[in-house]
Amino acid sequence: MSDQDLKNMMAKLIASQVKTDAQLAKTDERLNKIAKMVGGMGNNQGDVAEEYFVNSLKDNLELLGRHYDVLIPNFTIKSKNITDEYDILLVNGKELAMIEVKYKLHQNDVKGLEKKIINLKALPQYKNYKIYAGVAGFKVPQDTIDLAIKKGYFVLQRKGDVIDTYARELKVS
């Protein structure tokens, strides 16, 4: 094989590699778009679940036999030491109920509550509060309920007969 043959072969390999790299870049772009769409669907489902539980609790601030003064949705802690998000907080002068909401609950959601409690207790305004923690979801497997109860947390699950009706001037057809 001559030097010229080797150069020609290398040129073909390089051209082939450039073509492959371009195709991989297109594939990566498509996969990123799909990942964004799938992530968006998951976020939408989470938003639906959060809205449901906020709406279910906001008109009657009673939970676990306790009355709360305020419902705080989407509470965020951002400090130099702590960053955390809370889906729902119910607060009165001495107690706080923290609720982590998911469309479908998993055992890891229950396991993550301990850290969230620690982070809330680190805030000066809540350090002396009694904190009750729980999870809420549309789909809650029994093993997740069992784990939550075992750890001393509460579980909220959707019940199908709770709806609000909005109507003003109904059209009769």
Image: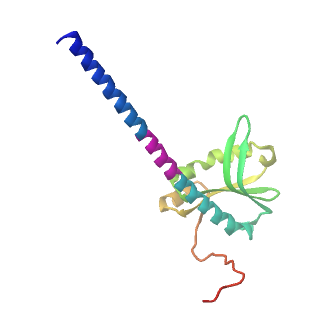
Residue drawn at x 36%, y 28% as measured from the top left: 18
* Relative depth, front residue between 159 and 34: 34
Residue at 53% across, 57% down:
105
Viewer-nearest residue: 147 or 92: 92
Classify 63 as above or below 44: below
Task: Work out whether residue 1 or residue 53 is closer to the camera in this orientation and state it.
Answer: 1
Point out the stretch of residues depicted in magenta: 27-39
- Where residue 1 appears, as percent x and y from the top left, is 16, 12
Residue at image point 71% right, 35% down: 81
Judge whether residue 136 is colored magenta.
no
Q: Main secondary structure of the magenta part?
A: helix
Q: Nearer the viewer, residue 1 or 172?
A: 1
Q: Is residue 154 at least partly visible in the picture?
A: no
**Can residue 28 be found in the magenta stretch?**
yes
Name of the residue lying farthest toward the left: 1
Drawn side of residue 168 relative to residue 14, left or right:
right
Work out whether 163 lies above or below 40. below
Answer with the quarter of the image where residue 172 lies. Answer: bottom right
In the visual, does 58 lie left or right of 102?
right
User: In x, y percent, where is residue 53?
Assistant: 65, 64
